Amino acid sequence: MKEILVRFLIGGIVVSCFAVLGDLFKPKSFAGLFGAAPSVALATLGLAVVSDGKWYAATEARSMIAGAIAFFVYASCVSCLMRCYKWKALAVTTSSILMWLVTAFGLWYVWLR
Amino acid sequence: MKIRVNFSALAETKGQEYVVRFLFGGLVTVVAGIMAKAFGPVVGGLFLAFPAIFPASATLIEKHEKQKKDRVGLTGARRAADAVSVEAAGSAMGSIGLAVFAVLVWRAAPSHSAWLVWSGASLAWVWVSVLMWELRKRL
């Protein structure tokens, strides 16, 4: 329970810091870079090294490459849908998470499994 | 297009919106940890690049753009959608930097000090992301 709480606090703080950085910068396309900041990774990998060792963190990082490729597909998909159809942001960004899941687990199936 | 820092943008975000981002960030970090414990680091690692706060941030951008247009008596739906689209395109460029960050941690973490790896990989993320953003702008 204590570990979950620590993880929650560190994750919340790191993610919020990158989000604030994203708010500060203009133009919007540059601010968008911070939407793909390694915020969850920094919080998680640091804890992984302390609790499970360096090899565990390295294994997680290898899978993160697939997650980052999935993020590229997700963000590109959101960008195209919003530009072409002008739908509601919440609907597009949440439904496109399915795209992230399919890409990430597809890469896991063919490369990491 | 010059890169500018706009501190007044911080005032546009309400306290409640900061709390939502904090909760999302904390929640995704906990879920990534739980997935790693339940299914191992190979599956858990995928979630280190989960679009954690992207939906919350995109919704905020949409809301702020609409509010700006509402103030001058216009409907800003089209402008708001374009703003989210541009932000998402920027995030796509950032995700290339994220992949480079992951490669560096994967290759360097077992043999180097954690602080050196995190700092080097974070700098590489910044450098690659900005480079990709510049390249995209010129194309």
Image: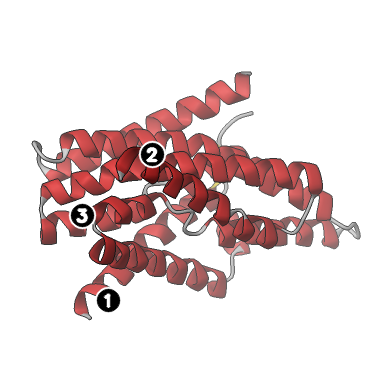
Asked if both marks, 2 and 1, belong to the same chain, the answer given is yes
Q: Which corner quadrant holds the C terminus of chain B?
A: top right
**Residue beneath the point at 49% across and 73% down:** B19
- Decide if residue A7 is in sight here: yes
**Residue beneath the point at 47% across and 50% down:** A21
**Of the residues under marks 1 and 3, which one precedes in the sequence?**
1
Chain letter for mark 1, please: A
Q: Residues within 10 Å of mark 1 (few under 14, many from 20)?
A: few
Q: Which corner quadrant holds the N terminus of chain B?
A: top right
Picture disc at residue A46: 3
Q: How crowded is mark 3: few (under 14 residues within 10 Å), some or many (20 or more)?
A: some
User: What residue is pinned by disc 2?
Assistant: A110
**Residue beneath the point at 34% across and 45% down:** A64
The span from disc 2 to disc 3 (Cα, nearest Å) is 28 Å
The span from disc 1 to disc 3 (Cα, nearest Å) is 15 Å
The span from disc 2 to disc 1 (Cα, nearest Å) is 34 Å
Picture disc at residue B118: none
**Of the residues under marks 2 and 1, which one precedes in the sequence?**
1
Q: Would you say the residues marked 2 and 1 are in contact, meaning their CB atoms lie under 8 Å apart?
A: no
Q: In which quarter of the image is residue B119?
A: top left
Picture disc at residue A5: 1
Instruction: Tell me the amino acid under the disc marked 1.
Output: Leu
**Residue beneath the point at 8% across and 36% down:** B111
Chain letter for mark 2, please: A
Asked if both marks, 1 and 3, belong to the same chain, the answer given is yes
Instruction: Tell me the amino acid under the disc marked 3.
Output: Gly
| Relative image position of residue B90 (x, y in whole percent) | 57, 38
Q: Would you say the residues marked 1 and 3 are in contact, meaning their CB atoms lie under 8 Å apart?
A: no
| Relative image position of residue A78 (x, y in whole percent) | 64, 47
Foreground of the two, A67 or A109:
A109
Q: What element carries label 3?
A: helix
